[in-house]
């Protein structure tokens, strides 16, 4: 199954879930010494490798970060070809002054927001299914 593509169905059934923990974005030149089981996401850019990981892991590895984030998963299985989902929820969040960083994975979309905004972000996202 390739996931839902229809925007209204996605919005009504996205069921945001707040993951437990504090998460941070870090960078490294190489990740050879990092246990991949401790990394939530990595992406290789020209400048460095971006890591998303638990704050406690970053602290243990002595990695720098600038903001502590919360992680919200949209539990609907969205298609990688769906159009408009990211635009819809990011617009709604931005109207409430909430910055979001989005990672689209195979099954779900994942939203990283400042920890202080987690409750407000969940309220905004839940309005789509009401």
Image (cartoon, rainbow, N blue to C red):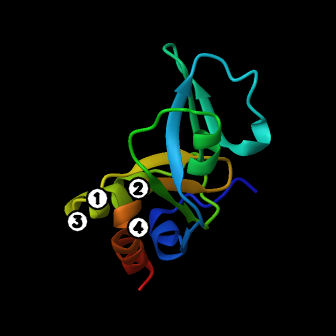
**Residue located at (41% from left, 60% from top):** 115
Point out the frontmost of discs 3 and 4.
4
Residue 5 or residue 72, whichever sits in front = 72
Dividing the picture into quarters, in which one does residue 57 lie? top right
Point out the frontmost of discs 4 and 1.
4
CA gap, disc 4 to disc 2? 7 Å
Please give the residue where the numbered disc 3 appears in the rendered image.
96
Residue 52 or residue 57, whichever sits in front = 57
CA gap, disc 3 to disc 4? 12 Å
Q: Position of residue 25 (x, y in %)?
A: 50, 39
Q: Position of residue 67 (x, y in %)?
A: 39, 46
Query: Do the numbered discs 2 and 1 sit on residues whose CB atoms are within 8 Å?
Result: yes
Query: Do the numbered discs 4 and 1 sit on residues whose CB atoms are within 8 Å?
Result: no
Point out the frontmost of discs 3 and 2.
2
Query: Do the numbered discs 3 and 1 sit on residues whose CB atoms are within 8 Å?
Result: yes
Q: Earlier in the sequence, mark 4 or mark 2?
A: 2
């Amino acid at each position: 199954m390739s996931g839902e593509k229809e925007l209204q169905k996605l919005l009504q059934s996205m069921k945001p879930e707040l993951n437990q923990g504090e998460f941070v974005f870090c960078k490294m030149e190489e990740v050879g010494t990092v246990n991949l089981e401790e990394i939530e996401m990595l992406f290789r850019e020209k400048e460095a490798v971006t890591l998303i990981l638990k704050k406690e892991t970053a602290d243990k590895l002595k990695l720098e970060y600038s903001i502590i984030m919360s992680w919200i998963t949209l539990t609907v299985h969205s298609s990688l070809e769906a159009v408009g989902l990211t635009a819809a929820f990011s617009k709604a969040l931005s109207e409430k002054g909430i910055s979001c960083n989005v990672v689209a994975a195979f099954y779900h979309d994942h939203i990283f927001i400042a920890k202080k905004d987690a409750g407000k972000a969940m309220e905004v996202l839940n309005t789509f299914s009401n």
